[in-house]
C-alpha cells in the first residue's frame, strides 16, 4: 500500500513577507503624510494671502477717508498707544480673525496686549510709517502720494514667530531685526504690497535693507 505524503505550506506570512509588507506600509505612510502636509500648508498659505488682501483693502479705505494718509505702526496721540491693526480694524468689520495667520501657532488673541505681542503679521514700519504723537520724536507718517512705486512697496508680511509686536524690519537691523518667520512656510513669506496685490517672497530677502526696507522717508531719531 503506497502512502503519498504532501507538504502543506504553513498558514500565515513568513518573516520576510511581514517585513516586506511593513516596509511598503512605511513608504506609503511617508508619502501620504508628506502629501497631506503639503496640502495643509498650501491651504494655510492661501488663507494667509486672503487675510492680507483684506488688510490691503482696509488700508486703502482708511487712506481714502484721510486724503491719502496711511496708517502708522503706532499712534500715541491722546496718551493711548494704537497699533496699525487697531487702526484698520473698523474697516474689517471688527473681525480680528483676519489677523490670524493659520500657520502661526503662537498667535494669542486672549487680550489686546498678548495679541499685539505675538501678532501673526508685521507692518513695515521703516517704510510705511512708524509713529504719530510719540514723545521726543517727530511724526513719521506718509501718504499714498509719497510712494513712488506702490507695487514694489512692501506694506505687511508675516511676523516673527514670537514677540513680533506687529512689525517687521530687516534681519541685520541691530535695534530690532524682526524679520518674517522662516519656518512657517518653509522659507517663504506671504506678503502684501501697497497697491493691494499679494505674493509669496523668499524670507532670505528680508535679511538686508534692500530691496524692501529702503526708507522713503527717514524714521525720526529720538531727541536727546
Image (cartoon, rainbow, N blue to C red):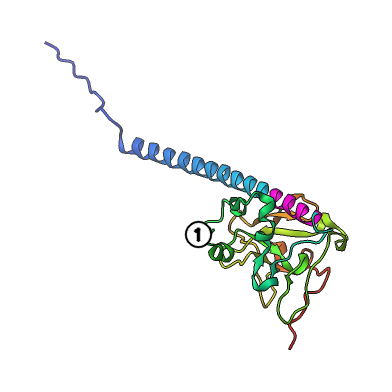
The answer to whether residue 199 of the structure is visible from this angle is no
Q: Report if residue 196 lies within the magenta region.
A: no
Residue 98 is situated, as x and y percent measured from the top left of the image, at 62, 51
Please, what is the dominant secondary structure of the magenta stretch?
Answer: helix
- Give coordinates of residue 57: x percent, y percent: 74, 50
Residue at 67%, 53% in the rendered image = 90
| 176 vs 143: above or below | below
Circle 1 is placed at which residue position?
110
Boundaries of the magenta span: 52-64
- Relative height, residue 11 to residue 200 (above, below): above
Between 52 and 16, the one nearer to me in the picture: 52
Give the image quarter of residue 128: bottom right
Q: Residue at image x 36%, y 40%?
A: 19
- Quarter of the image with the N terminus in it: top left
Q: Is residue 213 left or right of residue 13?
A: right
Label 1 environment density (alpha carbons within 10 Å; few <14, some 14–19, many ≥20):
few
Mark 1: which secondary structure? loop
Amino acid at each position: 500500500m503506497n502512502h503519498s505524503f504532501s507538504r502543506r505550506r504553513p498558514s500565515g506570512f513568513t518573516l520576510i513577507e511581514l517585513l516586506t509588507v511593513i516596509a511598503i506600509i512605511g513608504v506609503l505612510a511617508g508619502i501620504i503624510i508628506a502629501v497631506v502636509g503639503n496640502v495643509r500648508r498650501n491651504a494655510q498659505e492661501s488663507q494667509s494671502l486672503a487675510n492680507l488682501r483684506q488688510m490691503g483693502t482696509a488700508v486703502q479705505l482708511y487712506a481714502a477717508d484721510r486724503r491719502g494718509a496711511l496708517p502708522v505702526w503706532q499712534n500715541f496721540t491722546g496718551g493711548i498707544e494704537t497699533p496699525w491693526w487697531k487702526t484698520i480694524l473698523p474697516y474689517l468689520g471688527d473681525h480680528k480673525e483676519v489677523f490670524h495667520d493659520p500657520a502661526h501657532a503662537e498667535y494669542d488673541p486672549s487680550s489686546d496686549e498678548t495679541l499685539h505681542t505675538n501678532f501673526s503679521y508685521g507692518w513695515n514700519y521703516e517704510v510705511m510709517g512708524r509713529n504719530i504723537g510719540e514723545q521726543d520724536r517727530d511724526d513719521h507718517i506718509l501718504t499714498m502720494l509719497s510712494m513712488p512705486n506702490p507695487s514694489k512697496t512692501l506694506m505687511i508680511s508675516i511676523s516673527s514667530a514670537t514677540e513680533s509686536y506687529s512689525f517687521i524690519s530687516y534681519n541685520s537691523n541691530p535695534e530690532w531685526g524682526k524679520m518674517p518667520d522662516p519656518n512657517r512656510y518653509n522659507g517663504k513669506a506671504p506678503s502684501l504690497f501697497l497697491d493691494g496685490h499679494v505674493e509669496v517672497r523668499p524670507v532670505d530677502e528680508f535679511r538686508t535693507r534692500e530691496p524692501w526696507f529702503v526708507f522713503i522717508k527717514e524714521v525720526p531719531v529720538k531727541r536727546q
